[in-house]
Amino acid sequence: MLSAKDVRDRLPDIVDGLFRNVPSGLGSRRKDLKLSHGELKAVLQKGARWAIAHGFGTSSDLEHIENQGCLDDADPDAVSEKAYERGKDQLGTVGSGNHFVEVGYISEIFDENAARAFGLFRDQATIMIHTGSRGLGYQVCDESIRQMLRAAEKYGITLVDRQLCCAPFNSTEGRRYFSAMAAAANYAFANRQMITHWVRETFQEVYGASDVSLGLGLVYDVCHNIAKKETHRVAGKDVTLCVHRKGATRAFPPDSPLIPDRYRKVGQPVLVPGDMGRASYILAGTQQAMDETFGSTCHGAGRVMSRNQAMRTSRGRSISKEMEERGVYVRAASKATLAEEMPEAYKDVSKVVRVVHRAGISKLVAKIIPMGSIKG
């Protein structure tokens, strides 16, 4: 098991290796992995299962991924050719914006019982990955917005904001979007699984040891910005709902049959990333979340500055040097990315997680302090 000291002593080697092995940045692509249309269709159908079947990780990883890394409602034929074109060579890449691969360590444990179930301990080295369905998912969303705007008019739905465009779930437009969105989610599951594999390979290269001996097991892969069919208790009855977690993530409680056996006494792991200079958190889902928020909680800190405002604020500064002075070694595709993602562009995630903890919709388990990061 790697400690913070183990990683800090080799931090530049680790971060440089991650930057070399996991492409990041706007339009980033893997030159060594180009998928045919048929292969990409299989990714959209099978998700992380496709990645593992092709040697990217082990079957035990699937136990620690939401929905075992695959949404069965996916229909690859609902995805446009343009989306296929954008996604064919972006699998296994981080992308741009707030996406990252971050190396950190656990500085504080709030719930010893839950931390033990999650396999976490104080001063333990961690790796957190935040990325999704890349250009393929963006294209699905972009095309669907136009379709939903027409559908809202067709079905007589009054929109208070065009960004809330929608269609009835069981309409032709609603079913097509849900199937395409699920396919994009499967792409994201496969994408994160492949990056997980290359993260492990990077650590193996640096330390000359196996990922098992280094303790590089998967705690959890959980989605955000996703719609899913789930059963919830409403007015005393079990009802099947479409739960759309936009800016939210799942937080299922203890005893849920939909979380791994080893976590059922404490609740589902919830990952809440912060900014690259302060902290991120691991929480656990609660029954109160199921009762009050359809099993949901926050998924991050949220911005307080637009990207343009962050660029203006950072003018004349070296964000990479500022991060180094904080003890955080960063690599990014461009200086602009670092400026847009500087810590003060985000809310303090510590305040955010305290709110959801006190509200009872997820409980604090561990605090992670960043040591190094690759950004898109």
Image: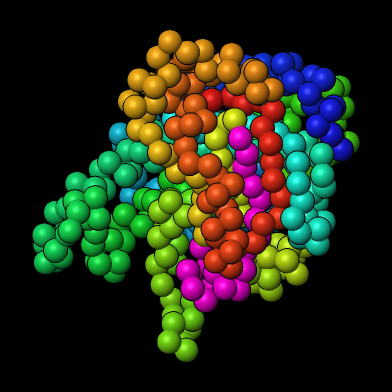
Residue range corresponding to the magenta coloring: 278-296
* Drawn side of residue 15 relative to residue 233, left or right: right
Q: Residue at x 25, y 43 (%)?
A: 143
Relative to 176, residue 332 above or below: above
Q: Is residue 64 magenta?
A: no
Quick check: 258 left or right of 112? left
Using the image, determine if residue 309 lies above or below residue 236: above
Residue 326 coordinates in the image, percent (x, y): 65, 23
x, y percent for residue 157: 15, 65
Of residues 46 and 117, the one nearer the viewer is: 117
Query: Can you tell which quarter of the image residue 193 is in?
Result: top right
Residue visible at 52% across and 76% down in the picture: 291
Could you tell me residue 77's position as x and y percent? 35, 48
- Outermost residue on the top side: it is 316
- Residue 38 location (% of width, % of height): 45, 38
The image shows a total of numbered marks equal to 0
Give the residue at x 81% y 39%. Answer: 124
> Can residue 26 be spotted in the picture?
no
Rendered view: 4 above or below 145: above
153 horizontally vs 278: left or right: left
The image quadrant where one finds the N terminus is: top right
